[in-house]
Every structure is written in structure tokens, then in C-alpha cells.
Image (cartoon, grey):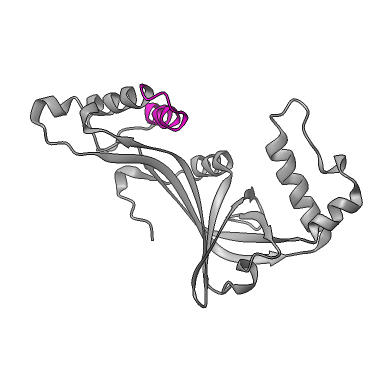
Amino acid sequence: MLYNPPHFRETDRAVLDDFIATAAFATLVTAGADGPIVSHLPMLLDAVPAPGGSLIGHVARANPQWRASDLDRPALAIFMGPQAYVSPSWYPSKAAHGKVVPTWNYAAVHVTGRLSTFDEPDALRALVDRLTATHEATFASPWRTTDAPDDFIRAQLKAIVGVRLEIAGVEGKMKLSQNRTQEDRAGVVDGLERRHEPAAAALAAMMRTAPPRP
């Protein structure tokens, strides 16, 4: 369960799907006999099955997660967005009353559902082709799986197992100072931008478009 106060909660599925597509990389958590099992992997949204769709990706065949997970229990995929420390010195209200403390702003989406696995060569090839096309799309000369010898690709496919998480729930937490005054939020945006760090700049950009939720 994610602690998610109302002023940070994002429920718009289109917004959440866009976040997942942008973040692209997930922490996959499943339950095993000895406790949680965790992998980090790229995952793609898929429209099948309806109505919630699924997340698809792959793990190494040597990775015990696909064998050791209890597939009758829900799995969790966590997508993290930008995150950064927020100094109380950035709040204009500090000068007014001093009742401020440090915090951390961040964005995350949790996807829950049942996990299944697959290792059919055609399905794995289609998955790898899609992953490659998605992440090579911005390159001037995108690499394609067909650029490598076919027998080499077939051998590589034998070393992976596909995973599909059938989506039962999607929960977004966008902790972007929505519970602060407009003046304090502006102060945080300014403070983040002055750090000249990519994550801080990305977080500031999200804060500029996030509506206040007092």
C-alpha cells in the first residue's frame, strides 16, 4: 500500500500512462517463499488484455525471479520520476513565521496486478523488437535487431524470459508542494532551478504545471 495523501494523488489514467511511458524503467517486486524478489527492467504498456492493459518486459533466464515468484499473489511495478531535496530556506513563509521544515519532492507511479511469464521465441522477438524501436526512436540512426545476425539474436532470446503484469490498479503520487501556498511553491521552483541539476530542473517543470491542492 502506498501512503498517498489526497493533495499528492494523481488519478488521471492518461497522465499516469504518459508518466509510465516517459519513465520507462521499472522496479518489479514479487513475493517469493523467502520474501520479496526485486528486479530492475524496462517495461512497456500494452493494451492487451482489456480493460486495464498490461506491462511487458523481460528478465534474464538466470534471474530466479520468474521461477521463484508466487504468481498467485499480486506483483508491483514501481516507476520513479524526478526527485530532489527541498530546503525550507526556499519558502517565503520562513521569513514570516519560521514554521517550516525540510522535505523531499518526487513523482512515482505504482502498478499492481498478476504476473505471468512467456518464452515463446516469436513472442520474445516481438517484445525485443518493440523495446528496441521504442528506445532507439530518438537516435539519428536507430539500431534495429535486424542489424545483427539472425542466429545471434535467436541465441540471445534463449537467455531471457518475458514477463507480463496484467494491470489491476495504477496509483500515482506526485509530491510537488501542492499543499503549500502559491508563494512557497514558486520559491521551491526557483530553488530547484538554481541547483542546475537535471532531476531538479525536471521536478521544477512538473511543479509549474501541477495544480495546487490545499
The C terminus sits in image quarter: top left
User: Which residue sits furthest bottom?
Assistant: 33
Residue 137 x/y as whole percent: 71, 33
| As drawn, 8 above or below 27 | above
Residue 91 x/y as whole percent: 21, 28
Q: Nearer the viewer, residue 76 or 194?
A: 194
Residue 177 x/y as whole percent: 30, 36
Q: Give the range drawn in magenta.
A: 194-209
Q: Horizontal placement of 96 versus 40: left or right?
A: left
Q: Residue at x 54, y 41 (%)?
A: 23
Q: Horizontal placement of 148 versus 199: left or right?
A: right
Question: Is the magenta region chiefly helix, strand or loop?
Answer: helix
Q: Horizontal placement of 74 versus 131: left or right?
A: left
Q: Horizontal placement of 146 versus 28: left or right?
A: right
User: Which residue sits furthest left?
Assistant: 97
Check if residue 134 falls in the magenta segment: no
Check if residue 202 falls in the magenta segment: yes
In the figure, residue 104 lies in which quadrant? Answer: top left
| As drawn, 65 above or below 170 | below
Q: Which of 96 and 160 is in front in this view?
A: 160
In the figure, residue 181 lies in which quadrant? Answer: top left
Residue 13 x/y as whole percent: 50, 45
Q: Which residue is drawn at 34% across and 43% down?
A: 8
Q: Residue at x 41, y 32 (%)?
A: 203
The N terminus sits in image quarter: bottom left
